[in-house]
Image (tube, coloured by chain):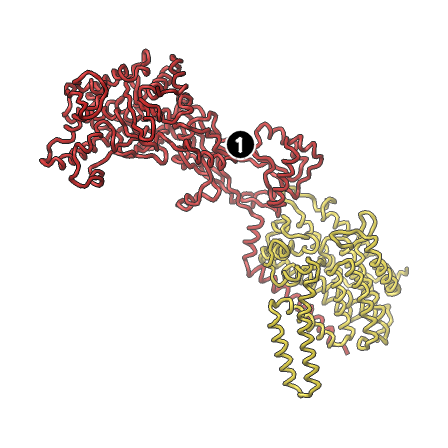
Amino acid sequence: MNDQRPVAIVIFIFLVGVVLLTKLFLIQVVDDSFMKKAERNAIQRVVDHPYRGLVYDRNGKLLVYNNPIFDLMLVPKEFEVGDTTRFLDIFGITKEELIEAYTAARKYSPVKPSPLIKQISTTDFARIQDYLIDYPGLFIMTRSVRSYPLPIAAHALGYIGEINARQLESDSSNYYRQGDYVGLSGMERFYENQLRGQKGVKYKMVNVRGVDKGPFKDGEYDTASVAGTNITSTIDMELQRYGEMLLNGKKGSVVAIEPKTGEILAMISAPFYDPNDLTGADFSNTYRSLNSDESKPLFNRPIMATYPPGSIFKVVQSLIGLQEGILTPETTFACNKSLVACHNHPSPVNLFGAIRNSCNPYYHQAFRQIINQEKSSNTYKDTEIGLNAWREKVLKFGLGGRLGVDMPNEKGGDVPSSKYYDRFYGEGRWKYSTIYSLSIGQGEMLVTPLQMANLAAIFANKGYYYTPHLVKAINGDPNQIPEKYQIKNEVGVDSYHFDMIQDAMAQALYGTATRAIIKDIEIAGKTGTAQNPHGEDHSVFVAFAPKSDPKIAIAVYVENAGWGGRAAASTASLMIEKYIRKEITRPELEQYVLAGNFIY
Amino acid sequence: MRESDIHIDRVDWLVVAIYFALVIFGWFNIYAAVYDSQAPQSMFDMSINSGQQLVRIGISVVLIVLIMVADYRFFENLSLFIYIFFIALLVVTPFIGKEVNGQVLTVGVGSFRIQPGEFAKLATALALAKVMERPTFDLTKTKNQLIAFGVLLLPVALILLQPDTGTAMVYFSLLVMFYREGLPQRYYILGFGFIALTLLSLGIENNLYLVAAIAIIILILILMGKKTWQRIVVFSLIGLGMIAYSYSIDFVVSKLPDHQQNRVMVLFNPNLDPLGVGWNVTQSKIAIGSGGLLGKGYLEGTQTKFDFVPEQHTDFIFCTLGEEFGWIGSLIVIGLFVTLLVRLVIMAERQKTRFSRIYGYGVISILLFHFMINIAMTIGLFPVVGIPLPFFSYGGSSLWSFTILLFIFVKMDSSRAMQLGRLG
């Protein structure tokens, strides 16, 4: 009666087998998406971040290095505290801190690691290390942050931070990933490609809780990271530190250059900040507070602040006049105060006297001859031709455009061309009387402190300069620095014209900046005052020394400190002595600058 | 014990060979599931699952020997006592058992624990064989049907109290045995229709489609036959009943405990919650699916080894196999099970007593159900129910109860020459 039923059961058994094997065939052989999902599950691509290159000063002292920091991580699900008192003792936290961190970690994920204690010092790490074995769910994660032995040169060195969306988009090499650190300013940004090294990749296996289970296929697909290249900077650490001490509490810039090479010995932007503050976990908080600080500590004044060059520009005017043959050392003008205001000094003066006394009417008259050479009978046209020809000569001094220092965001300043006045007054509607304030470095001209320091180097070199730069050697090799820093730039003024200029600048100190005089070190300098419509004028001084064999050219700006002969000249003088003599022989002058009471 | 009771030459060695093949293959997979390439431990290490399973396999061999040397009538004679003993054990389990995850499944002393629910299957199969062996017993008669279902449903009710839905479901596999023994086909048609309607109610988001389909079918049935007044009323009532049932299913599901409700819903849409309830099925499919044709190689699997698949050495042991041995491995294991089951059907049909034939079909029913449901759940064809893969999964109660279940039948088969023909 039931003969066909056993057959039906056997058929059913086969049917089950066929259905299962068919479904298995579909997911195991036909559909390969499961393989990818499995890889995504268990194979983790871990980027091996290379050590960023170190930065040394010109004497081989370390300026920037990588400091390993340790974060104690917690996996809540695996964590067992045991004896709480002992735990708190070992790890040096309070019960409240532990509860708070644990609650936060638990909220984030019970199985993924969260930080329990951040940035443990190396000594604490050594102490804690042995106890970790007693506590499941705790482990140390090592990172490295940029670190600075001295809290100096923040602007020149720059900082690194997480790459932003815009930078990621413009990264054509497709090297960076979200969360990568890149140089965001200063040398860190300019030499990013050298400093960053080459990332490596490791494929490791992890279990469901993300715990490392060893390399995938014994590391067959792994690539090793290559450490970044070390860079030697031109900065003199001692000089930089000393300069920052002098400018502490003030606003301003100091740029010191070795004239023969264009190497920047010191580059100070005040107010400054401790570069150590812009590293690690505190980066965003510190950055936010620095960025909102009204004194703008992040603003890199030496290359971003622009001021009218003032009286110092008279030296450039003299050189142009001499080269043009319009002026000779004997050319004499009266100090005609009806043309432009001046202070009291003997009149008339020759060129030497004009530089020495910084005579405004002299340059008003000399500049007219430079501009109006009667190349056209139309005085408007003649002024235009003269201005543009003059401008070309000024640009050769490294003014009116970016010098090309190895830092991002350099400003070029401004030397106005005829187009500027055409736009402002209309074509053919301006003449010499419109532009005469250019003669004494006022009016529409703007320069950066870096350009002013470069001018000092040109005066020292008698007619040439190397583009100022912060890099002395890459990977220990001076020939690897960018080619443009190895090229001599001529300014188009014959060197013999500089002899008298240098003498006049040396003499000028005795008239306008007696504080700057150093026994046994002959300084050639020129004071300036950058007019400031918003308050007290800025004190400016450029100089080089020793006059016979210049080792240092310097520009000092102290904002709102009045006349150049006081704040700026004193600071420059101390910097020069510090660099050449390695010691300060005039503690009273140092005290005067440190006190910072320049207005009286 | 009589010498003549042991019939080594009559033992069905094919079944024994398949049994050992599955047990040993399973043992290798249990080791693979716990293997850690960073800290490899010996397969025989007592501190890991494979070592412990080896002990259980050893105990199983002892059990096999004991069964084979026992009197062939021993189990037949004691079948009702065994049934009553395990029913009693199931009754007391909730009171003396150990609670794990809200379920009380095991009883025992110290570390030696067994699951009465696992052994009660065997006892129920024996008891049913005993009850149904009478020549006058006829499953077409209502009275006999009630007796058979009574014996079947008693342990089910007790296991549902633990509560262990998966194990309770296994008992219904004995309907295969009832089928062989003549339970009318209309019960099965009704049952499958019922299950189909249940699954459709759960699977189809909008019940209105189902209502429309039922209405159309009923309408066609009415139009096709004689249009008598009574017929129209009866069919309409059946249709309304189906619709009411379909709606009540959704209601009942919403009243189920959360974890069961989720298991049901995820069957229809595993992507519903890939990190929560769907995790088991999703990860299990990934593990098996990533095995490919030939697998990743023994001990080379990453999904099972690194704990992506939960319960990887017990209910989800098939994942390790699928990942490391691929489709070929699946083919071998499924092939072994199918061969075993078909072989058991042949053996059952050659029995000379109703008792041993019925018991044989009991063994077939239980093994078939476990095999089918366990693998189906790992590949997302069935909701996740916690039942082990026979002979393969880690665990003492499971291995021992399947071993005893199978070898009682092997023993009966080897002694069939001594049995008097009592086939009715």
> Does residue A257 appear in this view?
no
Indicate whether A596 appears above or below A94.
Answer: above
Where does the image place residue A329, in percent across and percent down from the top left? 16, 19
Which quarter of the image is occupied by the C terminus of chain A?
top left
Name the residue beneath numbered marker 1: A68
For the residue marked with disc 1, what is the amino acid? Pro
Where does the image place residue A104, in percent across and percent down from the top left? 61, 42
Closer-to-camera residue (A248/A582): A248
Closer-to-camera residue (A152/B151): A152
Relative to A188, B326 lies left or right: right
Relative to B17, B418 lies left or right: right
- Indicate the chain coloured red by its letter: A
The residue lying at 28 percent from left, 30 percent from top is: A308
Query: Is the residue marked by circle 1 packed among few (<14), some (14-19), or many (20+) residues within 10 Å?
Result: some
Q: Tell me the quarter of the picture where residue B193 sits.
A: bottom right
Closer-to-camera residue (B77/B144): B144
Q: Label 1 is found on which chain of the structure?
A: A
Closer-to-camera residue (A530/B255): A530
Where does the image place residue A70, in percent across and percent down from the top left? 57, 33
Relative to A594, A66 lies left or right: right
Chain B: its colour in the image is yellow
Mark 1 element type: strand
